[in-house]
Amino acid sequence: MSWLLGAGMGFLRGGPLGAIVGGTIQHFFSKKVLKKINHSFPGVVDHGIFVTCLVVVLTKIAMAKGPMLPSQVLILHKFFKKNLNYDSEELKFIDRAISETQRLNPDIAPFVEQYKKASQNHYNLLLLALAYQIALTKDSLAKETEHLINQLAENLGVTYQEHDRIRQKYALGNTKNPYTILGLDYSASPEEIKKAYREKAGQYHPDRVAHLGDDETEDAHVQFLEIREAYETIEKKLNL
């Protein structure tokens, strides 16, 4: 119940999901629900924010490429039944949060930040894994969905290695990230990173491909910009 007295209530009142608070406050006054969350997810400090933001983020992932499917709603229901022993009455809160998210279609970033605060960064990989479960219900990973999941991973502060380990569980290849763009292992030394950048940048440098046709030149220029951005991202992270 502490979340109702702190920043959590203010977030929902002022934010895009304020409309659901009035109808669901009793859900979080329930000692039974609080006990379930404390038992299954120790370390969570704002129970209502944790549950609400988890539902919002996963609903947004499901909506990245078309309406949310009943099979995706079922995955959320199974999660709350299995991990929190939710009954049919308690699942009505989840359905209301899903419905309101679909109606308002809010930006995902603020909810990821609130989720991290509520969980004290204990369950970031859980949320990312659930995002893949939700997304792959539609059989294939659409570009729009993959982009949103990559944004989620970045906002959660998940490393490229951690992200790839989760993808491997679902038989997916590594993410397209600065290291894979430069053809590098995650353990690459600063010297190896600089060498790979020089080689890749030289291969696609505009001056080197100017003699090619317009389409080839344009493709090479796009590749060059991507390579430079990848190197600058690593450079900034590692202070090269």
Image (cartoon, helix red, strand yellow):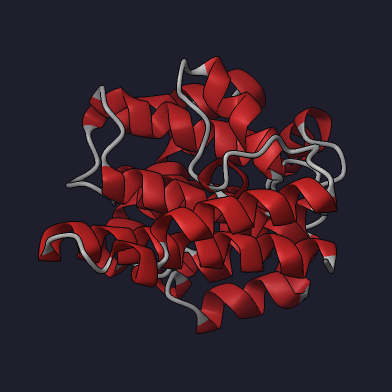
The residue at 71%/68% (across/down) is: 4
Residue extending farthest left? 214
Q: Report the quarter where the C terminus lies.
A: bottom right
The residue at 71%/45% (across/down) is: 159
Total numbered badges shown on the rendered structure: 0
Q: Report the quarter where the N terminus lies.
A: bottom right
Could you tell whether 97 is left or right of 124 in the image?
A: left
151 over 130 or under it: above or below: below
* Residue 36 visible in this rendered orientation of the protein: yes
The residue at 44%/43% (across/down) is: 94
- Front-most of 36 and 112? 112
Residue extending farthest bottom? 14
Looking at the picture, how far across and down is residue 138, in whole percent? Answer: 25, 27
- Quarter of the view holding residue 142: top left
218 over 37 or under it: above or below: below
Could you tell whether 148 is left or right of 12 in the image?
A: left
Residue extending farthest front? 211
- Front-most of 54 and 95? 54
Looking at the picture, how far across and down is residue 14, in whole percent? Answer: 52, 84
- Front-most of 122 and 101? 122
